[in-house]
Amino acid sequence: MTMAKQPILEIRNLHVSVNHTPILRGIDLVIHHGEVHAIMGPNGSGKSTLCYVLAGREGYTITEGQVLYDGKNLLAMSPEERAQAGLFLAFQYPVEIPGVGNMYFLRTALNAIRKHRGLEPIDAMDFLQLVREKAKLVGIDERLLKRSVNEGFSGGEKKRNEVLQMAILEPTLAILDETDSGLDIDALRIVADGVNALRNDQHAVLAITHYQRLLEYLVPDYVHVLIGGQIVCSGGPELAAELERRGYAELGSQVTAVVQ
Amino acid sequence: MPTSTAKIEEIVSREYQHGFYTPIEEETVPAGLNEDIVRLISAKKNEPQWLTEWRLKAYRHWLTMREPTWQNVRYQPIDYDAIHYYSAPKMKKQPKSLDEVDPELLRTYEKLGIPLREQELLAGVAVDAVFDSVSVATTFKEKLAEHGVIFCSFSEAVQNYPELVRRYLGTVVPYSDNFFAALNSAVFSDGSFCFVPKGVRCPMELSTYFRINAAKTGQFERTLIVAEEGAYVSYLEGCTAPMRDENQLHAAVVELIALEGAEIKYSTVQNWYPGDKEGRGGIYNFVTKRGICLGRRSKISWTQVETGSAITWKYPSVILRGDESVGEFYSVALTNHYQQADTGTKMIHLGRGTRSTILSKAISAGHGQNSYRGLVKVMRGAERARNYTQCDSLLIGDRCGAHTFPYMEVRNSSAIVEHEATTSKISEEQLFYCQSRGISLEDAVSMIVSGFCRQVFQELPMEFAVEAHKLMGVSLEGAIG
């Protein structure tokens, strides 16, 4: 049976300001279930702003446009409602929460999401098994699970912990905010494997990255280039390679010329 | 103000849950204080002559003292003549068993989650229930007696073990110690007494549950715990009171005595009525708590979770007299709305090789003010004494305050004294991180606060740790915004 699938995410003409300074200036993006999109762009192009706006962080003013998640107005939802509806943001700089056990945190999160889906809280033994299995998958040391959330973790460990959370929460739309930055090649491969494991026709991924490196392991269906708060061009995976060769500056000036 | 701050504050201001009043006939002495009232209280309790004299000496000394003003809290002057110094539920005679206790009283404790019938109790905890000025019931007395452990109300101890009471009463906190200790010594009404003989490890947790019910009364209880050579006891106290617009005074004295090799673990979960959102009403919790490690290698450990009271003003202390004795103080103090707390400890090192640890966690929300005040004193003879102090403060919102007043007096050059302090705010980043994982703002705050308090909660007996976690959640309601 074929029918027109409803997109999981639909961003229409999104304009966002921070302290009256426009950061995003008219973003249009449609993501369907099963697709992997990558957004590439130089520093200051608005990549992280886009992530935070989608996840519902305070301090961003939507001046124009709308965002639909599964057909619903995403911008009207609280951050926890978005998470419960299956949206996940892997943070560029995950936060430390002293004294709160990593396992406890994960279980609380999972149960909050299960509750929203009308499921019972997960049984303690089942949870333990699930965590062990996923920890193995993302190559995270079990000792880290016993520590406080991200406390004293290395940069790479924090990123893996984000991927572990993602693997356990199984989001419908996973947004990765430069999850590849600061990772060595092995860690990068593990992160990509974690994301790839999630890849099927139910899930979608939006990977934000500065470099093309991640995209060698995590082959996207679509690549978008974000410069100055606008998507200046879109294409297939080959666009990432081209960007790597020519750099953002050249592409940026070319596009600006075209727009003008 | 960002919306998350507003929401945090809302979460920290939920209603007090133990604020009900029990309509029960009580016998109350006239308001005000004079020698006749002191004698009357003593007579009501059928006390021996020496104790009546001791009370009177305390009263006369109190008259010469002035209320202290050095603390970092503010309150309207207390009218000591407006207070009723004794109030007790009317009972025909001292109940011999729970069947003779007024069912209304039993219901009160049930409502507070403290069933007094032994079969309903947590198997491992014996309870002494103190209602206003008197103890209404003590559970598991017989079972404890099999081990030689005495656990009863203070009044019963005076009747049944007068020599023990006389030997130890006032030896750690003399009646002349301070203004409120003197007042307590004059008019104290009841409290708990515990004696653990040589070599006995008390087979269960002992606890006292204090309830203030009557209006315009003060509660002045007295607790005395003695652990003989090599004995061990873990003791807990809990406190609640009805909601009222006026302030009520609670001035207790607790004395702990640990002989050679003995260990006393004393835990408090204090949840007196804190007053309303505008700071009206609430309990003045002005308490003197002190223990002495008399013998070698003895140990006294205080753990307190202070979430209630309009004002909390107390410094559970340890005098480390025996060589190699150990003193510990673990504290969580939470102030919300207009609550104030000035709390900490004193560790007095006298013996050689004595060690003390202080871990204080202060949480301020709303207009709450929280001060840590601590004294570490190492006397000349305390060779190789060691202290480690850590004071952490957590601020929620931007109208509260955290203050630290550490004092150190070191008179022995071989001593090592360390102090660390931090102040932090619950960050918007931490909250957003939790929320973006599907956790509600409310749960996120209580999770972060519990995490902050974890090291202290770990020191609580299991049953209380669960209680304390819940209490933090409730006390913080309305703090987030």
Image (cartoon, grey):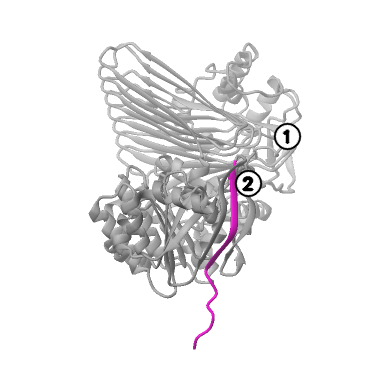
Answer above or below: position of B318 versus B140.
above
- What residue do we see at 68% from left, 53% from top? B104
* Front-most of residues B304 and B403: B403
Which of disc 2 and disc 1 is earlier in sequence? 2
What element does badge 1 sit on? loop
* Front-most of residues B101 and B436: B436
Magenta segment boundaries in residue numbering: A1-18
In the figure, is residue B33 to the left or right of A193?
right
Answer above or below: position of B315 versus B136.
above
Instruction: Check residue A15 for magenta coloring.
Output: yes
- The residue at which mark 1 appears reads as B280
Q: Specify the amino acid type for callout 1.
A: Arg
**In which chain is the residue bearing label 1?**
B
Disc 1 crowd rating (10 Å Cα; few below 14, some 14-19, many 20+) is some
- What residue do we see at 73% from left, 23% from top? B79
What element does badge 2 sit on? helix
Q: Specify the amino acid type for callout 2.
A: Lys
- The residue at which mark 2 appears reads as B7
Answer above or below: position of B389 versus B436.
above
Residue A149 rendering spot, x and y as whole percentages: 39, 48
